[in-house]
Amino acid sequence: MSDIIKFGIRKDKKALEEDLVLSPKFDENGLIPCVAMDAETKQPLMLAYMNEQSLKMTLEIGEVVYYSRSRQEIWHKGATSGHTQKVVEIYTDCDQDAIIVYVDQQGAGACHTGRNSCFYRKVDIDASKNPVNLVTTEDFTYDADAVYKK
């Protein structure tokens, strides 16, 4: 883990809300949720998690690095596919327990299914439908099987 990047010490609520020092609150598993959004279109691309190491790596290299909960390992987005996410801006919420990173998405998409965004379905909010339906809003932008050699 980087010794170059240092986070602030978490203090009282007022300090967390107003101090200008990044003091992320990682959960009991050492993770913080991170939403990646396209810096130009503001489209949500994906939701993933970071741990302390991946957040520091993101700040150091300027590309988004996550922590894969399923694989239990650091995950440099795009290392396999080439579809990296270059950091444009990073925001944290008021109590610093969530991150939004605006990215310049490289390659054909962020989603492992072959779409630009992981948020390619919307909920049909018509309450009279049971079960609740989803509507696909995005076509494939690349061949996931070819990229990930499934």
Image (cartoon, rainbow, N blue to C red):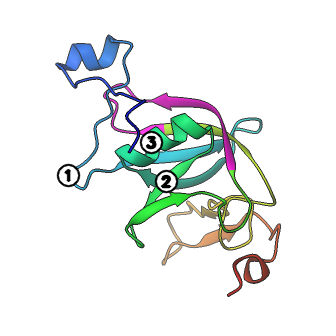
Residue type at tag 1: Glu
Horizontal relation, residue 6 to residue 125: left or right: left
Residue 52 figure quarter? top left
Q: CA distance from mark 1 to mark 2?
A: 17 Å
- The quadrant of the rendering that contains the C terminus is bottom right
Residue type at tag 3: Leu
Give the label, 1 or 2, closer to the camera: 2
Residue located 41% across and 65% down the image: 73
In the rendered image, the residue lying farthest to the left is 12
Q: Is residue 135 above or below residue 12?
A: below
Residue located 36% across and 17% down the image: 21
Q: Secondary structure at mark 3?
A: helix
* Label pair 1/2, CB-CB below 8 angstroms: no
Q: Which residue is mark 2?
A: 66
* Label pair 2/3, CB-CB below 8 angstroms: no
Residue 82 figure quarter? bottom right
Q: Which residues are magenta?
A: 85-99
In this view, the residue in front, 57 or 3, is 3
In this view, the residue in front, 76 or 140, is 76
Residue type at tag 2: Tyr
Tally of marks: 3
Residue located 80% across and 71% down the image: 140
Q: Which residue is mark 1?
A: 28
If you read the primary sequence from the N terminus, does the residue marked by circle 1 or circle 3 appear first? 1
In the rendering, at what x and y percent does residue 78 appear?
66, 60
Q: CA distance from mark 2 to mark 3?
A: 7 Å
